[in-house]
Amino acid sequence: MKATTLPAESGADALQASCRALAERARQAARELAWVPSERKNRWLLAVAEALEREQDSLLRANAEDMAAAPQRGLNAAALDRLKLTPARLQAVAQGVRQVALLPDPVGEIRGGERRPNGLEVCKIGVPLGVIFFIYESRPNVTVDAAALCVKSGNAVILRGGSEALQTNLALTQLLRTLLARCGLPEDAIQSVPTSDRAAVGYFLRWPDCIDLVIPRGGKSLIERVVAEARMPVLKHYDGNCHVYVDAAADLDMAERIIVNAKCQRPGVCNAAESLLVHANIADIFLPRIAAALQQHGVELRGCPETCRRLPGITPATEEDYAQEYLDLILSIKVVHSLEEAIEHINTYGSHHTDAIVTRDLQAARLFAQRVDSAAVMINASTRFHDGFEMGLGAEIGISTDRFHARGPCGLRELTTYKYLVTGEGHIRE
């Protein structure tokens, strides 16, 4: 499937009108979808999972077109990895969609209530947010994750993927929309912005009457632009500067496995480790060991003076390194002399995304969990587990480092709000 874009001669007015019409169709679809029965939404989800497997060859061909064009866009190895679809990744996406189908529907969920002394029944119930404008880069599997979560939670979604994944995203979106119509759901509940023109994003950000929430998922410059221009709420995370702290009481075999996994399994994702802290009491033993393990995977190390003294030849770390989300096979290392110093370093330089401690000291683990101000704190586990699928949400539309209205992986419940239902028997207020 080839991209369908607006002709250049149509101009800014035509582009704005086209975007406005798309947004209005999404608003109407959201109204129709809001109270669709769970059974019908789940039927669509299961059909999507089957189609992803059945249409694997055509989807991979579309992705191959994007991959072939990627070198011209200057994508690095990590970005290419995010862009690439494989049979295994498509299978994982299908599995995630099936898991979403099995999860409770948050729409209509009773979230609290009571009978007041005067006899009024007060009930809080889950309802969809409405229309979500989702802007994201590279990873085409996110197209399916976002659509699955939005439809199951009763929301319409407008998808604006990166131009580097245009052919893949168009193929996926067409598949999803076709199945919506077959399952009796409004086809415009899922729409893709059919142009790579950056001006289109600005138009959608001006229309709070059509868009209820914006979720940008990508580089810092993208998120800063959305925050600056949006006239509706924005759910975001800026950086994934994730730390692993190896405590004096750590099991060093465990620590090595966790660090290599957190840094090397997929270095180009937001929950990959970017910084390593090592307690001074074990630094002489552990640093040469972990350096050798990481360098076998091609990781470039940048260390503090105490680290460089123990690991001659590595690059000295700067202040910028400690705050950097590399999204690459690069890791900063700092030797710390106490748990408190490790916590202070993380809270100063971290991005409040994911931070881990490796320790056999229960009290140290408790203090770390209490005092590290991050969306997820891992104890003796890789940062890579901060993920909607791994944490039982089926999938996620993003990992929020905000405090309002959601934090961490945003799944079904995070894509809803609530309203109060008050039932009386002719009650009046005196």
Image (spheres, rainbow, N blue to C red):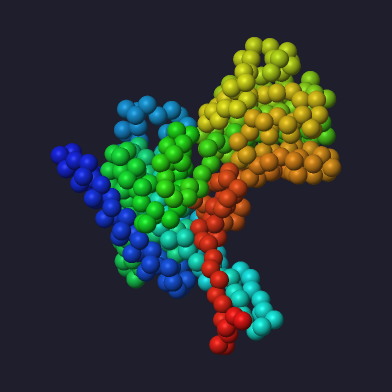
Residue 174, given in percent of the width and then of the height, sits at: 30, 55
The reply to whether residue 390 is in sight is no
On the picture, is 151 further left or further right than 73?
right
Furthest-front residue in view? 430
On the picture, is 394 further left or further right than 51?
right
Residue 369, given in percent of the width and then of the height, sits at: 74, 44
Q: Which of 409 and 44 is in front in this view?
A: 409
Q: In this view, does 39 lie above or below 52?
A: below
On the picture, is 348 further left or further right than 324?
right
Residue 190, given in percent of the width and then of the height, sits at: 36, 57
Give me the residue at 36% from left, 47% from top. 206
Q: Is residue 133 above or below residue 186?
A: above
Give me the residue at 42% from left, 45% from top. 230
Give me the residue at 69% from left, 43% from top. 378
Q: Nearer the viewer, residue 201 or 295?
A: 201
Give me the residue at 44% from left, 64% from top. 154
The reply to whether residue 270 is in sight is yes
Residue 158, given in percent of the width and then of the height, sits at: 37, 53
Quarter of the image with the C terminus is: bottom right
Tag count in the figure?
0
